[in-house]
Amino acid sequence: MRELLKYLNNYKKECVLAPLFKMLEAVFELIVPLVIAYMIDRGIKGSEPKTITVCFVILLLLGLCGLAVSVTAQYFAAKAATGFSKDLRHDLFSHILTFGFSEIDNTGTSKLITRCTSDVNILQNGVNMFLRLFLRSPFIVLGAMIMAFTIDAVSALVFVFVIILLGIAVTLIMRANIPMLKMAQTKLDGVLGLVRENLSGARVIRAFTLEEHQINDFHGANSELTGVQMRAGSISGLLNPLTYVMINIAIVILIKVGDVRTDAGIITTGQVVALYNYMSQILLELIKFANLIVTLNRSFASAIRVNEIFDTQPSMKNGSIQYESSDESNVPLIEFKDVSLKYHQNADEAISNITFSINRKETFGIIGGTGSGKTSVCSLIPRFYDATGGKVLINGRDVKEYDLTSLRKSVHTVMQKAVLFEGTIRENLKWGNEDASDDELMKAVENAVCSEVVSVKGGLDAGIEAGGKNLSGGQRQRLSIARALAGRADILIFDDSSSALDHLTDQKLRQNIANLPNDPAVIMIAQRTVSVQDCDRILVLEDGQMAGLGTHEELLETCPVYKEIYDSQNRVADEVE
Amino acid sequence: MAMDTSGFVPKGNLNADADALKKTGKRGTIKRIWVYLKSYRPKILLSLILAAVSVIYTLLVPIKIGEAIDMIGADPKSVYHELLLAVLFALIVGISQFAMNLLNNSVTYHTVKDMRNSAIEKIEYLPLSYIDSHPSGDIVSRIVADADQFADGLLMGFTQAFTGVMTIVGTLAIMLSMNVVITVVVVLVTPLSIFIARFISKHTYDMFRIQSTERGQQTGLIDEMIGNEKTVKAFSKEADVIKKFDEINERLAASSLKAIFFSSLTNPCTRFVNAVCYALVALTGAMFSISGKGSISGITVGTLTVFLSYANQYTKPFNEISSVISELQNALACAARVFELMDEETESDVDTAETLKNCEGNVDIKGVDFSYDKNKELIKDLNISAGSAQRVAIVGPTGCGKTTIINLLMRFYDVDAGTLCVDDKDIRNLTRKSLRSSYGMVLQDTWLKKGTIMDNLRLAKPDADKEEIIEAAKACHAHVFIRRMEKGYDTMIGEDGEGLSVGQKQLLCVTRVMLNIPPMLILDEATSSIDTRTEMKIQSAFYKLMQGRTCFIVAHRLSTIRNCDIILVMKDGKIIETGDHKTLLAAGGFYKKLYMAGVGNNEYAG
């Protein structure tokens, strides 16, 4: 939590004023028993209606003042809490956007999203409650004790004892209960997971006639949850009755002591009543305080989770050199020198010892089975990941030296999964090139063979829903290609990106790409030989290793893996002819 | 004290709540709840008795203390006596409250448990049509969040409301017995706080609505941008995205401030009303005390303190009851949603259903009509006849009804007209269990459960030993990647096979079927994500799998289809061509068109 406190810096004034006003409110509340005592001792005992009326007015005024200061306090607390969460959310979101691909992979998207949303909300609530209550409750408890001392030191000792005992009791109960609540939450998550699993697996479960097996599993998990909830409940259910009994015993002792001391003429009946009222105030405040601790505990848990995200630092350091196109023909455009990549420290290498180069304007194919490392190789070019061994050079320089933004503006990748964002078609296409004119965008659209898609949807201003939901898979795919073509990138990477396109469209697309005016280097990743056989050269990968490099014809001769892939896909075709 | 799950579990949709409640009716729902709680009725009754006891003694404690105060300095013995009683009463309150808490917990948590247990039993036997047509998030929230809210809200709300009413009635009775005028003052002033609370919540409703809309927008943006962060990074759009985020963030902060501040006025305001009430009681009480010295209406200092402490207590149940009422409403709505799920009809076999034994695998589909949406025709007059050990391939463009045939074969759905027979028996006269266990099924949509790899493979054959499983995994080329995993066969896989590629998941599913091969097989795009070379390598395993069994194969890879005995070419829910590979090619119809397109374009045929 401490690390997050800096987000309150902008709201120092509010953070001081809110508890301060709350304390003022407490002061007013603490005066009430004194007024009542005076009313009894002077007003009633002395039969002075005037005193009673004055006391009544004072009570009303105290209430009014309490209202005024507490409204002010609520405002400052709300202001600080919402401001805190606003700043925190901004920083958290920005921080997540600095993550490299490996940090995103390691943390997991859904985790990142909950941190930004529900965890921050919990924290906001925690700050709000903290500012409102954390000072007020102890202040009332201690204040009541101090007031008791001003009335009568001996009686006040009862307060000291009871406060200590109550403190111990509340702490013990809380300490036993909080881990149980956490465990109950974990078990509840487990039950939730099981329900989801049973729904998504309905067909398989029935096919294997596992219904009873699944029901038994669920019953087991469910009973465990109930067991934990019962245990947690019986402990927290102890809190209220226990504090109630303790306070009442204290009150009884107080009055007993008061009885003796009134007899001796040391204090008045009114003062005994005042002491009694103070004790009652402590009880009310303690219950509030216990609830506050539960809220704060949840906030602490969230704070720890949020801090984990802040502690995750992007491993990638940005370079300083601006990428510039170059025509120097003696240096290859892209060069891999003995490159390896591991996604996790303990994992096997995804690709090992890859060495090849790609020249300017070349069309380069990469082929291999699932998990052979095709995407891994290509993700090193725009520096989505850093090679864990060897070097990747562009224009003769290590990719690590380039400024990432300038590099990625020149290397456009069309990923396997076509992603579009909420907004208009134009906004989406401009991701590829902010300064593109409508003509340029339309040209890119044409090249991506999706003029028809754009016109059907209603032009560049047509809306796209979140995730491109209002488009078919093929339409999304083509628009994401158009987005990549909108810029004049030197390197274009197509990661199996024509899978959702039919044969004719795919062919047309490849033609258009070959005829692009700026003539970029094009890298085509594919599972099937037909998609790469026209490339200038083809890299064959198997299990992360290079299995061959050459033209289609060369590879058929020299590379058994390539030949096998080719055969597995063309055996049938031969038969037709 | 029940757990607060609000931050973690999606709350039931409010509109849907209202709908569900409307359908069943409030009264009907309450009646069912009462029936549902049958076995807990003694506990509930006991809990209510304890609540009554605790309320009565809570009210008596201040009286005893007040009496003791009156005796101060006059009669030490009676002071002692009264105080002893006060301690005794406080103990009774404490014990009965604790016992009540335990009982309530027990009833609450066990009711939820019962509900969830019967819900999951329901889920396992609900017709697939229900599961397919209802978003799983909705069903999950009924079972998890709604069940929780129901138990919490209803049972806690119920006891709270009961205690509240008891407290109000008890307080009133005691106050009236002590002094009518002061009682009237209290009764007149306290309801004010309820009006104020109502007023505030009514007027902050809109602010909360704005807040939640804006929060929704922000969550949407976060979801979109972080969910697709790789694309954001690939185009270096971080700065623009943050700008957009900040714009919503500012709006959200402003609307949150409004909503939080105005709603937080409730407490200070009700506290103020209490203060006024307190002051009035003090005033009238003190005045009575002076004026009535000696007369009947006169009250003592002790009585005054009793009144003062009641004035504090009396408003609390009022505030609670108003919130309890809305909670009860919500609980009813939640209960209605859970009951709605429980009322769905499950699949059940006819009474005369036979068990399919020694299945030979003769499948006859005669004149079958079927559609999911009865207004939209899908399959019309379908006829397929597959003999024992024949391989039937089903090809055709997307949406032509291939997967639907599988739904009918497995009896996930019932035919609308016509008959579907296995070994000359209408499958509607067979038990579902025996029918389904006669099929081995590998689907494109791989499903794995949370657990170890071994657990998942063992699903097919619970008594399989380790060697047998490894043998099967080797045959399916799954062994290679399993061995490379952190803990081999004991590696935990997350929900829905997290951490595995689709191809790997498919290999596991193939292995699973390999362990226990029933007489008939259904392969729906079973190898679509396995690369062609691995597929060739596991050919022999597949061969073994299919040998001597009736197979239904849906595939887009021609290599898989080519060797089938019968190829059914489907289009728009109808079979337009039938025959083997050669005759169909020779016929030069739709199949040839599909096939040639497939060869040209990465050998896709559907």
Image (spheres, grey):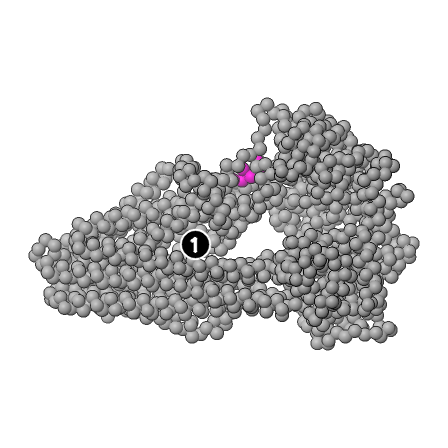
Judging depth in this view, the residue of B454 and B60 nearest the camera is: B60
Q: Is residue B152 above or below residue A391?
A: above
Identify which residue is drawn at 49% across, 59% down.
B212
Q: Residue furthest bottom?
A: A321
Identify which residue is drawn at 53% across, 50% down.
A189
Image position of A256 (left or right of B318) = left
Q: Which x, y percent locates residue A519?
A: 82, 67
For the record, the magenta segment spans B118-125
The answer to which image quadrant residue A509 occupies is bottom right
The chain carrying label 1 is: A
Label 1 belongs to which residue? A177
- For the question of whether residue B604 can be seen, the reply is yes
Q: Which x, y percent locates residue A441?
A: 73, 65
The answer to which image quadrant residue B417 occupies is top right
Identify which residue is drawn at 37% across, 50% down.
B324
Total numbered circles? 1
The reply to whether the magenta stretch includes residue B292 is no
Judging depth in this view, the residue of A457 and A360 nearest the camera is: A457
Looking at the picture, which amino acid does disc 1 mark? Answer: Asn
Quarter of the image that includes the C terminus of chain B: top right
Judging depth in this view, the residue of B581 and A77 nearest the camera is: B581
Q: Is residue B172 above or below residue A491?
A: above
Q: Residues within 10 Å of mark 1 (few under 14, many from 20)?
A: some
- For the question of whether residue B73 can be seen, the reply is no
Q: Which x, y percent locates residue B501?
A: 70, 51
Helix, strand or loop at label 1? It is: helix
Identify which residue is drawn at 23% across, 65% down.
A33
The majority secondary structure of the magenta stretch comes to helix
Q: Which x, y percent locates residue A332?
A: 84, 70
